[in-house]
Image (cartoon, coloured by chain):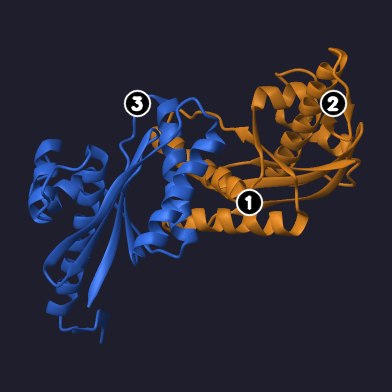
Chain colours: A blue, B orange
């Protein structure tokens, strides 16, 4: 049984996405990229670009689960509001396509992918390249999105393993 | 020719909506209400409720245009982020249903509906009741949403009037 996970790193200018397959303890790269919102365009147009591009990604790669990075709360209220709006468009697009949405902080992603929460961005990206056996380094936001997908793969794997060790057994991806 | 406008006052807990018809200088009440997001539920569930409820409103009343209040930028970053996410869900739902989206600040709404920007909330609500000949006062967020719809009706009317006075003529709602 393989699971396909869509990871997303939302941003007001660039939203990164990354798709991976999880087969047991193996993780395979499927696709990644970034959605650039037209700068200077009205808010409605920017959010439309994010939502419709995500619909295309979902239709093309058919993920079964989604994981979204919890955005950094900026000190500038206008920037925080804009980031919130972009993130709102992302999560709305995912739930309208019936995808379960998990959320991870940047700290959780770093801990899961690198092993400690203070890893610099470059180290996270290097681990993404290594864990997915990529031949080159993806664009920064796409790499962050792949890291979120990897964190979700580890987290849900750990959660199932924990349940399993408590006497529950996992069969065909379901608890029995 | 009549125009049907959907006004929205987004909020992280309650999102108000109001639908009005504009026939020349007349404004008629069509519907209003509020969408309550389940408190304590995960973000994805809260945004799903907002988007799907708005789809129902759009399907039921078939507005041709939408107007959204520009939210107050809170001093608390977490609250600002949540408000942004709710607003992102609102605007995404509107654009996915092909509605043109106009935005108005609270100041613009007050100026348009009451005549000055420092009017207290109660005075705005009283004007909404009067302008739409309502028999009772709607719930506060629904009244705010109706005020946004009224501001949009006035604003677009003024814009057409201004163009018209500059030598352009308006015929059947289009500039000729």
Q: Is B111 situated above or below B124? A: above
- Whether residue B161 is visible, yes or no, is yes
| Chain ID of residue with mark 1 | B
In three-dimensional space, the C-alpha distance between marks 3 and 1, rounded to whole angstroms, equals: 34 Å
Nearest to N terminus: mark 1 or mark 2: 1
Q: Can you identify the residue that label 2 sits on?
A: B176
- Is residue B40 visible to us here? no
- Residue at mark 3: A75
Residue nearest the observer in this picture, B114 or B27 = B27
Alpha-carbon neighbours of circle 3 within 10 Å: few (<14), some, or many (≥20)? few
Where residue A55 appears, x then y in whole percent? 45, 55
The residue under the point 57% across, 32% down is B71
In this view, the residue in front, B34 or A58, is: A58
Could you tell whether B5 is left or right of A159 in the image?
Answer: right
Query: In terms of secondary structure, where does tag 3 sit?
Result: loop
The residues bearing labels 1 and 2 have C-alpha atoms spaced at a distance of 28 Å
**Residue B5 in which image quadrant:** top right
Residue B44 vs residue A120: left or right?
Answer: right
Q: Which mark is residue B97?
A: 1
The image quadrant where one finds the C terminus of chain A is bottom left
Dot 1: within a 10 Å radius of its alpha carbon, few (fewer than 14), some, or many (20 or more) residues? some
């Amino acid at each position: 049984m393989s699971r396909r996970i869509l990871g997303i790193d939302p941003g007001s200018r660039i939203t990164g996405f990354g798709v991976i397959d999880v087969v047991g303890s193996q993780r395979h790269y499927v696709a990644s990229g970034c959605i650039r919102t037209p700068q200077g365009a009205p808010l409605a147009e920017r959010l439309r670009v994010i939502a419709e591009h995500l619909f295309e990604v979902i239709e093309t790669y058919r993920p079964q689960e989604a994981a979204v990075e919890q955005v950094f709360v900026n000190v500038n209220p206008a920037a925080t509001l804009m980031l919130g709006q972009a993130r709102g468009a992302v999560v709305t697009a995912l739930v309208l396509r019936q995808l379960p949405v998990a959320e991870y902080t940047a700290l959780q992603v770093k801990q899961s992918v690198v092993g400690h929460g203070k890893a610099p961005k470059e180290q996270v990206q290097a681990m993404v390249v290594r864990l997915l056996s990529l031949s080159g380094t993806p664009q920064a936001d796409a790499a962050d999105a792949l890291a979120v997908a990897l964190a979700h793969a580890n987290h849900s794997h750990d959660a199932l393993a924990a349940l399993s060790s408590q006497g529950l057994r996992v069969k065909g991806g379901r608890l029995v």
